[in-house]
Image: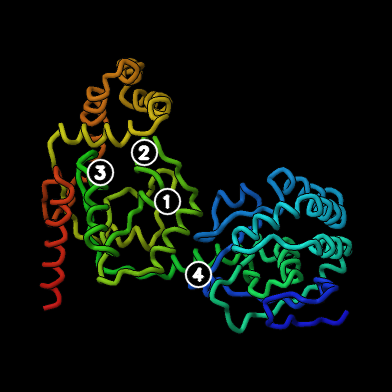
Amino acid sequence: MDKTVLRTSSAFTMSEPPHPLELELTSIGVEAALACPTARVVDLRSPAEFEEDHLPGAINHPLFGDAERELIGTLYKQVSPEAAYEQAASLVKEGIGELLESISSTAGRERPGSHAEQLVNAITSESLASMTGAIKVSPASALPEHPLIVHCWRAGMRSQSVVALLRGLGWQDVFLLEGGYKTYRRHVIESLAAAQLPQSFVLRGLTGVGKTLVLRELEKSRPGWVLDLELHAKHRSSVLGMVGLEPTSQRAFEGELAARLRSGFPSGLVVYEGESRKVGDSVVPECVWDSLVAGLNIKLTTSIARRVEVLSVDYLAAPNATEQLLRQLPFIEERLGSKKWKGVLTGLLSAGRTEELVEVLLERYYDPLYLHSEKGREHSLEVDSTDPCACAEEVAAWIEGVRAGMES
């Protein structure tokens, strides 16, 4: 079968569309895709795959649902690749209209015309052997202003067939992501392993002093200074840290950190909130952990009343916070001693005695743990954090003074 490279015209004008497999597809590498802020990324993987992790800004338009993907995988392993392919082709025919409509919306285009069905039939009528050998892919020499980048797990048949279809419809700015999500994931791992972070400063202090509040005020006044681990993990880094939040996966956590590191630290410094090696269930990568441990420590302090106020807002603001807390508090009761504390904390919460509950948690659970973990740690500065904005400005001024002294 002769292969014909599509012309650069953006409109398809032929009365009889060419067979999609006669079109040579073009691809873009992961680094180029990540470096293109105007790219629109379509992830064809199943919803469960996408939820675990995806490229920054990607939109999920699954070619198969979770159950369909599982069925195809079972057929592939237990029957034959051909049986899996036939099932996949049947499912594509059923759902292609909805898929094209959703991709058109993402791309800001009108829904494809009537010949889309003809092209789908042309693709799905091919045998597995024909499909495997027919599609040719070459690297893109240049990108348009708003490329549409399509990928699946490894730039295999899912994404190749959809790109071939869109190309057959005349969309010239559609590209495969080389290696698909698998290559993106490898890029994240490699970039984290090779990362070099600048001089670091770490906000520390007892639970509830408002370290996160100060850190985020600092980022507002000094953009680019902060690496907010709890923001990327979507977790407050404690046994109750997931309340009101939806913690991310380890892969997504690493992907977000890699994206933050790509944006760089133009001021030549980075500020963290003091954390343990795990933020919830997310493990901090070695490069970031080494940087955090080596940082100059800044101790934040405030009154117990202010700490109770901060934690009450943190943990009770979400609509379902009480239900989540009732599930988690028995763990702390067990740690404090089940004979004495069983039902005490959950009883305080159920009775609406939230300030008393928070004070007990601080004095009996959080403070002893924190003081034990911080034993022997030196601090270069101590600041009152009652007013997060004022505290952030004082911290920023001190850091700028330290940096100026080092550079003079």
Q: Earlier in the sequence, mark 2 or mark 4?
A: 4
Could you give the CA–CA distance between mark 1 and mark 3, rounded to whole angstroms?
A: 18 Å
Residue at figure coordinates x 27%, y 23% from the top left? 354
- Residue depth check, mark 4 versus mark 1: number of the one nearer the observer: 4
Label ID, residue 373: 3
Amino acid type at mark 2: Gly
Could you give the CA–CA distance between mark 2 and mark 4, rounded to whole angstroms?
A: 35 Å
Q: Is residue 365 above or below residue 252?
A: above
- Residue depth check, mark 2 versus mark 4: number of the one nearer the observer: 4
Under tag 4, what secondary structure? loop
Position in image of residue 280 (x %, y %): 40, 43
Q: Is residue 377 above or below residue 366?
A: below
Q: Quadrant of the N terminus?
A: bottom right
Horizontal side of 173 relative to 211 (left or right) equals right
Could you give the CA–CA distance between mark 3 and mark 4, rounded to whole angstroms?
A: 45 Å
Horizontal side of 353 relative to 177 (left or right) equals left
- Residue depth check, mark 3 versus mark 2: number of the one nearer the observer: 2
Under tag 1, what secondary structure? strand
Label ID, residue 38: 4
Label ID, residue 241: 2
Q: Can you identify the residue that label 1 sits on?
A: 283
Position in image of residue 149 (x %, y %): 61, 67
Could you give the CA–CA distance between mark 2 and mark 1, rounded to whole angstroms?
A: 15 Å
Amino acid type at mark 3: Ser
Position in image of residue 309 (x %, y %): 21, 33
- Residue depth check, mark 2 versus mark 1: number of the one nearer the observer: 2
Q: Earlier in the sequence, mark 1 or mark 3?
A: 1
Q: Earlier in the sequence, mark 2 or mark 1?
A: 2
Residue 45 lies in quadrant: bottom right
Amino acid type at mark 1: Val
